[in-house]
Amino acid sequence: MVIVSKKSSTVEQLAEITHKIEKLGLIAHVVKGHQQYTISVLGKTEKIQTSEFSMFPFVENVVRISKPFKLASILSNPDGSKIKVKNLVIGNSHVVVMAGPCSVESEDQTMRIARAVKAAGATVLRGGAFKPRSSPYSFQGMGLKGLEILKMASEETGLPVISEAMDLEGLKMMMDYVDIIQIGARNMQNFSLLKELGKIDKPIMLKRGMSATIEEWLMSAEYILAGGNRNVLLCERGIRTFDTQYSRNTLDLNAIPILKSLTHLPIVVDPSHGTGYRNLVAPMALAGMAAGGDALIIEVHDKPEEALSDGPQALLPTDFEVLMKQLVGMGDVLNRPVLKESTTKKAA
Amino acid sequence: MVIVSKKSSTVEQLAEITHKIEKLGLIAHVVKGHQQYTISVLGKTEKIQTSEFSMFPFVENVVRISKPFKLASILSNPDGSKIKVKNLVIGNSHVVVMAGPCSVESEDQTMRIARAVKAAGATVLRGGAFKPRSSPYSFQGMGLKGLEILKMASEETGLPVISEAMDLEGLKMMMDYVDIIQIGARNMQNFSLLKELGKIDKPIMLKRGMSATIEEWLMSAEYILAGGNRNVLLCERGIRTFDTQYSRNTLDLNAIPILKSLTHLPIVVDPSHGTGYRNLVAPMALAGMAAGGDALIIEVHDKPEEALSDGPQALLPTDFEVLMKQLVGMGDVLNRPVLKESTTKKAA
Amino acid sequence: MVIVSKKSSTVEQLAEITHKIEKLGLIAHVVKGHQQYTISVLGKTEKIQTSEFSMFPFVENVVRISKPFKLASILSNPDGSKIKVKNLVIGNSHVVVMAGPCSVESEDQTMRIARAVKAAGATVLRGGAFKPRSSPYSFQGMGLKGLEILKMASEETGLPVISEAMDLEGLKMMMDYVDIIQIGARNMQNFSLLKELGKIDKPIMLKRGMSATIEEWLMSAEYILAGGNRNVLLCERGIRTFDTQYSRNTLDLNAIPILKSLTHLPIVVDPSHGTGYRNLVAPMALAGMAAGGDALIIEVHDKPEEALSDGPQALLPTDFEVLMKQLVGMGDVLNRPVLKESTTKKAA
Amino acid sequence: MVIVSKKSSTVEQLAEITHKIEKLGLIAHVVKGHQQYTISVLGKTEKIQTSEFSMFPFVENVVRISKPFKLASILSNPDGSKIKVKNLVIGNSHVVVMAGPCSVESEDQTMRIARAVKAAGATVLRGGAFKPRSSPYSFQGMGLKGLEILKMASEETGLPVISEAMDLEGLKMMMDYVDIIQIGARNMQNFSLLKELGKIDKPIMLKRGMSATIEEWLMSAEYILAGGNRNVLLCERGIRTFDTQYSRNTLDLNAIPILKSLTHLPIVVDPSHGTGYRNLVAPMALAGMAAGGDALIIEVHDKPEEALSDGPQALLPTDFEVLMKQLVGMGDVLNRPVLKESTTKKAA
């Protein structure tokens, strides 16, 4: 951490800062410029907030040098985390494709789509039983019944299942039904929920908040990791920008190589929410894989016009099949092949 | 709602849409342009989502005409809501000033600051017992002990108290201690929590999410209103924009006259979080009042350099006193006087 | 400037940096942390770019301490600049109100509106002869004919005139016709034009780019100042954010107290473009003045439905009259009275 | 275009609107809802602005159905434009890679880098002679001397050259030296310059403004097209968002498939400016190609620590070589091969 004093600051004020630094068990190293002091703070500063010093009225600027996250840092696991989900691994040299409907709407609908995405090569099934909806008048998900349907689909197809938890009650319910807990963008800084997630041992897929910085996102992952759960996946799902006329969000693929340099946690890309429109999903899925994503999560629906949520962004099963072929081809060229079920079985 | 078809759309596709419109109990009125159909949907469309129609592949655009919120709409209460908090009212012709420390840190600290803000003219006391912090390693608030201290301060000064709830457990705890429940920006779309807030009868101050649109914000208020709790205050606390070098957030004062035209809910302005720096607070408090805010909420600390959270943005009691005098002067000129305790007592 | 090396950096790499620092005539002061070097750069660093050092592959971070602007800095003129425009001064203890139509559309229209805004108390007349329009098919302004009309209106009313220049050719044309040259948001970083503006001696009102940071804006002012023209006004006209449903831009009033702490240049607030809708203009004009603006610029049209540009945001003359009365009242309370023509005349 | 009236609007007001519609040579089709009128406007509405109607005080909303751009629209050339640059074509089934230094700094530097990028497989040479710099104190480019060097490099290597024009004077100078004129992000809405570009017949590469919407960008292209120059390339170079800690801009790859559905103009992706940091360039170049880009433009420097501009984002020639191999591999799999010089020659 580097602290810069204001031009007018006095020796007494400098002493106040160095005193505080020492009280925190750190070492202050002062450089006197022609008008200002620059104070380097040495020692374990990860858990110190910059505001500890910026609140002094005579401090102009405080700059963090070491990152505020520790367990999520690449330094704590330079080889990258490998997250085991049943008999497959995310964060490996393989790219994992998750697919399925936005919402579980009925047994029939879920079964049909689960079979279709499996046939096309997906190795994880997605589907929502609890739906965060901006309107209280929209379909809110099937709840427990939806979880039961997901489990049936998982058992029939052999695919592990990912589904979203919105609160503590739902989280408890899900423990027996799903293999990966998804935390949505709107709950990325629901700190009470993050603390609970730290206490369980299921993999968590933490979606990026709509306007969360990379650092805030990693700090939210840090909450889960610090609680004791080391199985965290990060999911880029589009950020909010000034232009929403032709896509609902802006899929931030810059985030992928940035995260690769900062953290060991595997990265999932969601081109469905990241764009919001069917015709953008395939190109952005390919781009997400090319940028280095460890997994993709894609919404598929065979009757999008009847979908109870997010129909406009769902791929048809036939479109998904075509996309899978392109992903497989690209994976071979990039030396990061798409994980196939047969590989999964062999690994098991 | 107006639906526009794609250029290539056929009569059969048009029939699919009009069929769906009628199934929803609405009336379709079709206008045939030289290349496209424009379909006006007449009837009660408030609770219909645009995605019901945009998911048809041959639909180009769906435009909502009536607002998606109903209970929050100005049409449901053109005179504006008046929210009663103990013996004062927010949403009246008076402007209410809430002030106090960011966090309750000790009995002594809270008492000192409570007395100071009362002396300067504040009529509501603020203070956090549960703190949403981006780092798991930061001070997380005193919890129940903090609530007890707040209640003591309230009893001594006679000021009603506002404090933040982060989850269901905290919410239950607060019912006996605080007069207004604050919901923070990060929980604005915590829909599970919003549903619980609809079931209680305490006033809720709902802060705007960091990148929430006006409409999303009103839809979150709609969750609480639809649940049965009609005592909702909206709090503008700064949005996230591209420039954070000199202020942590951008206080969006445009939102105030916009909200006045859309909703009957009273509006609180938070110039402390809305700027993040002490030297910006007073000018933006004045601006927030000039733009039409019904109340202000301002952080005050007498030893900001020892504050356990948000020290850099806290006003000193002496600065707050000066600001109060300016607000009072401006209120008289604008015909929206600052509420004084004597007025409160008289009203009681 | 403070440079932080990467964790793996070597003594040789450190020497490369210190060598470069010394070559630039600056002094390097190195602090060795337990893993990284922190190098304070002492001396005249205003004109050094951070990229001079960040381009070394073994540098992790470079932080500027002194500001990159010098002539625009508050340090170069702590009392604040007073910009003389004919017989009035902007940047004084008075608040100046500029008003008029968006575009000059005809002699009759301009005269009518000029008289109306003068009668209501405006002391500068605005009006566009060259219009930056996002569509090539929109009205592009009357050009030279428009300038002639503006001059006539100025002569009749005695009000000085502000109008926008879009290029070098237009700038030359304007020299004999207008008193303040306005540079629009889209040209804020038209560096070729900024260099030309540095060579003339007319006051320039530099609008903030739609997504320009405070620092970029001040650097654009620095271009003009460094060219030799010290008469620069800064105009906040709304920034682009994620929500444009109910206002075209977000008027960033935080910028006003921020600028007051950074620069001596007077600040103009444009609530017309800053909101885009008539019903938001008056509240935001009041807020802009309360936040500390030195001047306001407001669009007025007596037949907004016939306006050739920006009709939806123009105030009617009667609305403008009401607003002026409120501004005058507020100015008295805030000790920054609205400049009146009589005051102007006395000063002359 | 669809116009929606306010709830309170009268038959007389409705008549005012329909009268205006008819005066514009269009047809009004009115639908009366239970509270509001919806008016469909039929006819050639491309050149009509929504503000023509939104300025009526009794109009609530105006929605454009047909796009405001016409010549840039995919409808005007469904097969996509093929832009000829010397003996190569952009917009074909091949992907073109442009590479070179940010700035021309010396003959030696430019020659060395030109040879290196050619050897690695680039088929267009980039290099700046006029540099838009946010600080007036930064290196502003070599000007004419730089253009001469670029031409020498072009003649030796046989690669066509792209370079940026910032104003009319520079544009004239460039006509004899460069093969593609680049217009930078900051000049995307320099309408005076756009009009001049419409009068020449050289290909123009129009970069997206930092916060330009897709539609504004296409309208700027429309300026050039409407002026008579049909050789326009669009270049996505990163937009400004809320997070700039780890990348200077956010490369908006969603824009690529969106543009493919809206326009026939070829799309270039700039992963160098789109990220700002060397380590992000290769993954984002791959992603840009996977998302459907017709060309890439990449900064390469063999001594980035000595570069006079943008050193931190330049790839080393060896890194560029590795990237080219990956791009070639991916192109084969995606059926959009990277254009090779041999192909160029054969085509010539």
Image: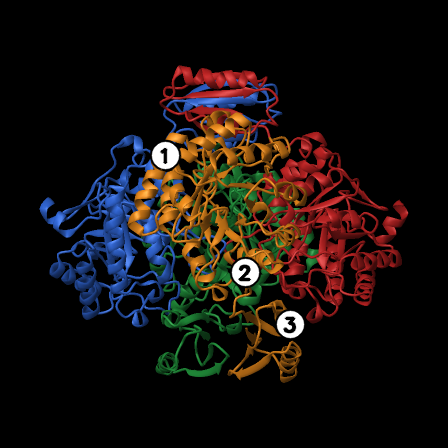
Chain colours: A red, B orange, C blue, D green
Q: CA–CA distance between discs 2 and 1? A: 66 Å
The tag on residue A130 is none
Q: CA–CA distance between discs 2 and 3? A: 31 Å
Q: Residue at x 49, y 82 (%)?
A: D31
The tag on residue B57 is 3
Q: Is residue A17 above or below residue D196?
A: above
Callouts 2 and 3 close, C-beta under 8 Å: no
Q: Quadrant of residue D58?
A: bottom left
Q: Is residue C133 above or below residue C22?
A: below
Number of residues whose C-alpha sits closer than 10 Å to that of mark 1, classed few (under 14), some (14–19) or many (20 or more): some
Callouts 3 and 1 close, C-beta under 8 Å: no
Camera sees residue A29: no
Numbered disc 3: secondary structure = loop
Side of B157 where B182 appears, left or right: right
The amino acid type found where label 2 is placed reads: Ile
Please determine if labels 2 and 1 lie on a single subunit.
no
Number of residues whose C-alpha sits closer than 10 Å to that of mark 2, classed few (under 14), some (14–19) or many (20 or more): many
Numbered disc 1: secondary structure = helix
The tag on residue D90 is 2
Image spot of residue C202 (x, y percent): 20, 47
Number of residues whose C-alpha sits closer than 10 Å to that of mark 3, classed few (under 14), some (14–19) or many (20 or more): some
Q: Residue at x 38, y 35 (%)?
A: B120
The tag on residue B321 is 1
Side of B273 where A348 appears, left or right: right
Image spot of residue B259 (x, y percent): 45, 57
Q: Residue at x 39, y 25 (%)?
A: A6
The answer to which of C128 and A257 lies nearer the viewer is: C128
Please determine if labels 2 and 3 lie on a single subunit.
no
The answer to which of D257 and D57 lies nearer the viewer is: D57
The amino acid type found where label 1 is placed reads: Glu
Q: Quadrant of residue B129?
A: top right
Q: Is residue A327 above or below residue C52?
A: below
